[in-house]
Amino acid sequence: MADVDFQHLSTLLWREQELLDLLLFKAEEKQYLILSGKTRWLARIAHEIEVVLDQLRVLEVERAAATEAIAVRLGTGVNPSLRQLADAAPPPWNDLLAKHHEALLVLVTDLRSLSDANRELIEGGLAAIGDALLSVRQPSAGTYGATGRSEHGSSRAVTLDGAL
């Protein structure tokens, strides 16, 4: 029975790795879209990323339940980390869980780096848009001061005859 629990947990961990790998791919797609200026597809890729994140959330609940069942049997305490579970597991599961742990760490590290880079690209793009909008402001027509002259010397007021 114990092997069944370990097998189930291992299957869940493989699935988590697949989803994280897919998420990494989607994040790279997003970066490509940002860099190439193909912003038309950003909403779609954001939706696809959200779908993968939802799948990961569901999987996380199932993984937590499987981990708790094994933790009770191994006596590792409540809510052990995957590393703690690997350390307490019998062979060959200890080695397999340790390898899952390492693979997940690599994927999460890569995802964080790519996510940070994408955020910086988006923030840089928004700042550039803001700067561009500020630089193309239309000059105002100006107002007249107490001397009867225009406050903005380069602009002059124009009167239009409504009969024209």
Image (cartoon, grey):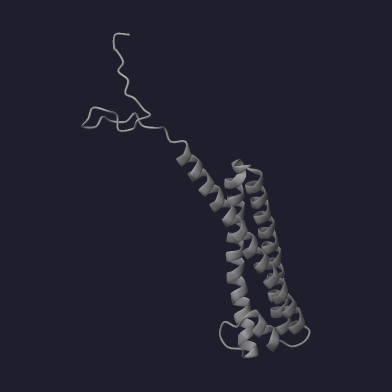
Locate residue 15, reporting x and y percent. 70, 66
Q: Residue at x 59, y 46 (%)?
A: 42
Q: Residue furthest front?
A: 147
Q: Residue at x 26, y 29 (%)?
A: 144
Locate residue 5, reporting x and y percent. 69, 79
Asked where in the image residue 69 lies, by quadrant, the reply is: bottom right
Q: Residue furthest bottom?
A: 75
Asked where in the image residue 155 lies, by quadrant, the reply is: top left
Q: Residue at x 30, y 18 (%)?
A: 159
Horizontally, residue 95 falls left or right of residue 37, namely: right
The answer to whether any part of residue 50 appears in the image is no
Horizontally, residue 95 falls left or right of residue 69, namely: right
Asked where in the image residue 139 lies, by quadrant, the reply is: top left
Locate residue 86, reporting x and y percent. 70, 83
Horizontally, residue 148 falls left or right of residue 108, namely: left
Residue closer to the observer: 83 or 3? 83
Q: Residue at x 59, y 61 (%)?
A: 116
Locate residue 103, reporting x and y percent. 72, 72
Q: Residue furthest top?
A: 163
Residue 6 vs 77, above or below: the answer is above
Residue closer to the observer: 150 or 38? 150
Residue closer to the observer: 149 or 12? 149
Quadrant where the C terminus is found in the figure? top left
Quadrant where the N terminus is found in the figure? bottom right
Q: Residue furthest right?
A: 92
Residue closer to the observer: 83 or 59? 83
